[in-house]
Image (cartoon, rainbow, N blue to C red):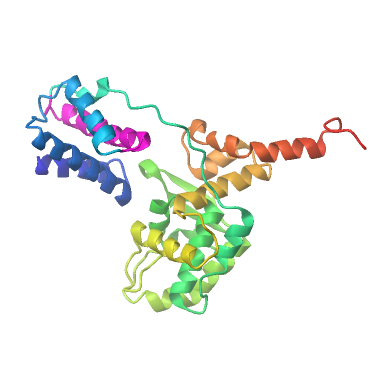
Amino acid sequence: MEETLQKYLDYLQFQKNYSHYTLENYYNDIVEFLNYLNKESLDFKSLEYTDIRFYLMYLKEEKKDTNSSIDRKLSSLRSFYRFLANEKIVKNNVFSLVSGPKKQKKLPRYFEYNELEELFNIPNKSTPLGQRDSLILELLYATGVRVGELVNIKVSDINESNKTIIILGKGNKERYANFGDYCEEALSLYLSDGYNRLNLKKSPYLFLNNNGEKLTERGVRYILDQIIKKSSITKNISPHMIRHSFATHLLNEGCDLTSVQKLLGHESIKATQIYTHVTSDRLKEVYYNTFPRAKKDD
């Protein structure tokens, strides 16, 4: 099974272009399931519908997993068994018969403008790592890129004169991301100073760790955690939360949904529509401040 699992992970990495963080989640979900099968003396090749239902009950009642966590694990296993079926290792994908628990729709969490301003002021721009961290924040917010896309940016992908970056997105699809003056300033400082001091190994990648090697997704998350700890903000932080802020603030300022979709690199408009719920309060404010018969004069 170890060889089959590794073959599946290679497929996700090299053919589906999944990020390291996603691969890690898939691996953990599958290993957890295989350990359960071993404990219950079940053969992964001859599972039945009832076996899967009992596993879901185990996750819910014994492990106390949330509905969203169970749904994610079910998705991982459904994909894994689809691969096994295609490889003729199992006869059929038993997970295709199972639907996950209903989960509440969670609206994307995002930072307010003033919160982002506080974060931007935390990195020490007189040091190479501080310049790098400042650029990470500015670039995540300026472009809305995913963390996996961020760490794969090469210096050669950046056109400073046009203020654009070639982003390699999901499915190896390229798109152009734009950045503005604040990001340009952080980029210019980092490339002229901190990057040269960090890049002792002549790496082509933009973001480097203190050993001069390509920064990992986990490394970016750690950096953001350290920044939030130095602030007065009580919210948790993640690269995706800054991406949510990028999309929400664009819509709040009047950007149309289709443009936001393209800027985020979403294939379907459905993935972008969740942000319309977040901005409803802003729309209400605009309505009452602009519609002539929204409120009566005193």
Where residue 290 appears, as percent x and y from the top left, is 81, 38
> Is residue 66 shown in magenta?
yes
Q: Nearer the viewer, residue 177 or 141?
A: 141
Residue for point 31% across, 23% down: 99
Which secondary structure class fits the magenta region best?
helix
> Is residue 67 shown in magenta?
yes
The tally of labels here is 0
Q: Is residue 291 left or right of residue 31?
A: right
Q: Nearer the viewer, residue 22 or 108?
A: 108
Q: Nearer the viewer, residue 73 or 133?
A: 73
Where residue 262 appears, as percent x and y from the top left, is 53, 41
Where residue 50 appears, as percent x and y from the top left, is 18, 21
Q: Is residue 32 left or right of residue 169?
A: left
Quadrant hosting residue 279: top right
Observer able to see residue 57:
yes
| Quarter the N terminus occupies | top left
Q: Is residue 102 above or below residue 278?
A: above
Residue for point 43% across, 61% down: 225
Where residue 151 appears, as percent x and y from the top left, is 39, 58
| Quarter the C terminus occupies | top right
Residue for point 38% across, 43% down: 170
Residues in magenta?
Answer: 65-90
Give the farthest residue toward the right: 298
